[in-house]
Image (cartoon, rainbow, N blue to C red):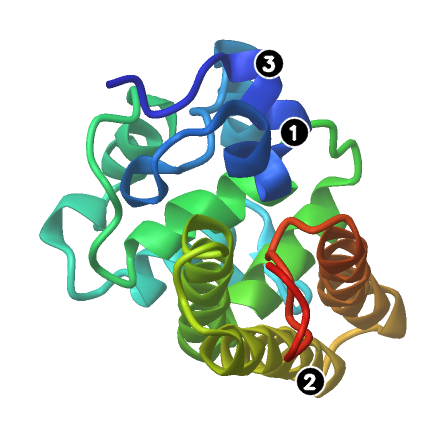
Amino acid sequence: MAPFCSTDCQKECWRIHKLICGAEPDVFRQAPLSSSEMTALDGLRGRRYGGPDGVQFDKYIMSVCWREPSLQTWPGIRALLVAPVTSPPVPVEEGVRETIICYSPGRDDGDWLVELFAMACRHLRGYLYETVWLSYALSLLIERKTTAPIPVRKRWFELLLVHCNRQGDFARAAPVESRIQNRLAGFADDRIREYGVMILSGKFGNLIEGQAG
């Protein structure tokens, strides 16, 4: 089974891609960087986060991935970003792939990207754990909308919102420029709005006791 229906579909709609093309949740991942996108990212590897005395961008990524030997060199990181998607993510380090791919395409402001990614890395573990749990709750709501009892699905939806709000809290608490905080927090807020639309359109089935599902 293909992890996603097409590169264009996944790059344009990665947050709601599963709802659009029906890819299985255990293989749902963002499409790899194109050669031009990777070349642009190569140009950032020597940038320093936090000014001239700050840590170098590529070294920062390696420090986040310290438990994974294959990601202790730039070629290793590069290979992770351009390789075809063949398996579901397991270790936290895989979140580095999703984070970089999310923020890399179409970014012309290299300093902004380095700061943004560094902030995401610093909060990576907590942020990623929230991502894992909200993705799991979303998957359950969609796939079991006609089989799980209403009280159970209502609890899943509550947890979905809890994890989205926690993501926003991670972003707002980060000691970085407010524009970066607002951008990341905005992603979490956007997801909450998306889920509100989904619940109204019946994507999660009926959540009101006493009514037909």
Q: Residues within 10 Å of mark 1 (few under 14, many from 20)?
A: some
Say left or right for 196 vs 204.
right
Say left or right for 184 vs 89.
right
Among the 4 quarters of the image, the one containing residue 8 = top right
Element type where label 2 sits in the image: helix
Q: Tell me which numbered mark, 1 or 2, is placed earlier along the sequence.
A: 1
Q: Residues within 10 Å of mark 2 (few under 14, many from 20)?
A: some
- Residue nearest the viewer, comparing 159 with 169: 159
List the residue tagged with mark 3.
8
List the residue tagged with mark 2.
169
Residue 78 visible, this orientation = yes
Element type where label 1 sits in the image: loop
Q: Which label lies toward us, 1 or 2? A: 2
> Residue drawn at (40%, 63%), measured in percent from left and top?
136
Dot 2 amino acid type: Asp
Residue 45 visible, this orientation = no
Gap between marks 1 and 3, in whole Å? Answer: 12 Å
Q: Residues within 10 Å of mark 3 (few under 14, many from 20)?
A: few
> Residue drawn at (32%, 65%), measured in percent from left and top?
63
Rendered position, 2 above or below 189: above
